[in-house]
Image: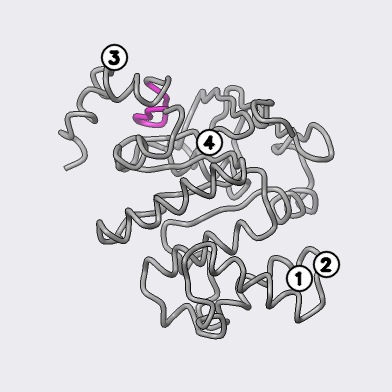
Amino acid sequence: MEKGELLLCVSNLSKYYGLHLGCEGINLTLHSGEVLGIVGESGSGKSTLLGCLSGHLEASGGELFYHGKEGLLDLNGASEQTLRRVMRTEMGVVHQNPRDGLRMHVSAGGNIGERLMANGWRHYGRLRAEAVHWLERVEIDASRVDDLPAHFSGGMQQRLQIAKNLITNPRLLFMDEPTSGLDVSVQARVLDILRSLVSRLGLSMVIVTHDLAVARLLADRLMVMRRGRVVEEGLTDQILDDPQHPYTQLLVSSVLLH
């Protein structure tokens, strides 16, 4: 896919938990090579929206179309088998807590290799070589390939989770608070690696964060959510330097975030 082509198109998406609103009336587009940031305070609906976009939550209504390698796909109406295949080959999800995205008692190399094996790889030597290559790309020493993620630091676990998702060269990556809970110096290292990989691989990405510094560093565009709805959207610098909605102004002044 050429950079700039439409990848994701969402219209009037909603998600309810019984009578409780998760998100409502969401419209968005995402193009290849673009990073979309979704920001808002806790409970604003941003993680619910990410769950619907990534196929981990079933939307209550609306349309969600993905322009994949096999053509236009309705993610809301696709079979579970089709969704699993697309998620395994064309998409990746990096969780806020690495323990949700890694098998902590399987080696680092084994975690990375699992995704390749699910895509038909069987040669042990090739699997191991590819795992080592990706460990190095996320700045984990190749000597740790047989170590368990349970013995890694939080920052290393998050970088391993990134490697695990990127090894199959997905076109679209979903990230939920990827640097939350990390020390500032570790956070900076993870963000630098992410920014470099996004640029080199031409990745499209949707990132949920409460940290506006993370959003400014990574996102081309921002959506600001409050109480399950989008209240403002636009180019990242435009939103953060000249917020128009009163809620966004509060976010930028850190009243709600600290």
Depth check: 128 or 69 in front?
Answer: 128
Residue 98 picture location, percent across and down: 45, 65
On screen, 134 above or below 47? below
Check disc 1 and report the residue beneath it: 117
Residue span colored magenta: 223-231
Please, what is the three-letter code of the amino acid marked with disc 2?
Answer: Gly
Crowding at mark 1 (Cα within 10 Å: few <14, some 14-19, many 20+): some
* Relative horizontal placement of residue 212, taking residue 139 as reference (left or right): left
3D distance between C-alphas at marks 3 and 4: 26 Å
Which residue lies under the disc numbered 4? 15
CA–CA distance between discs 1 and 2? 5 Å
Q: Disc 4 versus disc 2: distance between alpha carbons? A: 35 Å
Residue lying at 70% horizontally and 37% vertically, measured from the top left: 76
Judging by the rendered image, the residue that carries numbered circle 2 is 120
Q: Quadrant of residue 14?
A: top right
The quarter of the picture where the C terminus appears is: top left
